Amino acid sequence: MTADLPIRPVALPFADRVELRFGKAFPAVLVVDRGALPRLMAALAEAQSALESKEPESGGML
């Protein structure tokens, strides 16, 4: 996943879920139950915090 990848959230109120669509023509879809949204958001926040607390390594990828 990169910064320029389109992400489109679609609420599915009838199913009490949200679809997160990644991409354009043939998107990958992540379906998340309403009850799992806080857990997903917390995991993403934790991952972001961990990345921000680390110094970038020099040298880059091979």
Image: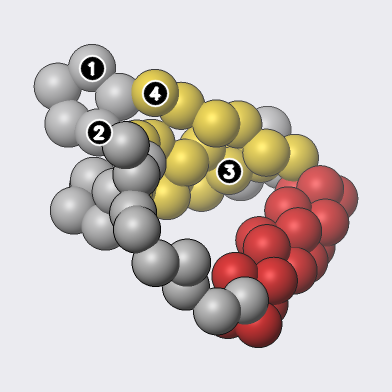
Whether 2 is drawn above or below 14: the answer is: below
Q: Are marks 4 and 2 in contact (CB under 8 Å)?
A: yes
Viewer-nearest residue: 53 or 42: 53
Q: Amino acid at mark 2?
A: Gly
Q: Residue at x 51, y 47 (%)?
A: 11
Q: Helix or strand or loop: what does disc 3 sit on?
A: strand
Q: Residue at x 68, y 63 (%)?
A: 47
Q: CA distance from mark 2 to mark 1?
A: 7 Å
Q: CA distance from mark 1 to mark 3?
A: 18 Å
Q: Position of residue 1 (x, y in %)?
A: 36, 41
Q: Which residue is mark 2?
A: 23
Q: Which residue is mark 3?
A: 18
Q: Which mark is residue 26?
A: 1
Q: Residue at x 30, y 24 (%)?
A: 27
Q: Amino acid at mark 3?
A: Val
Q: Which residue is mark 4?
A: 28
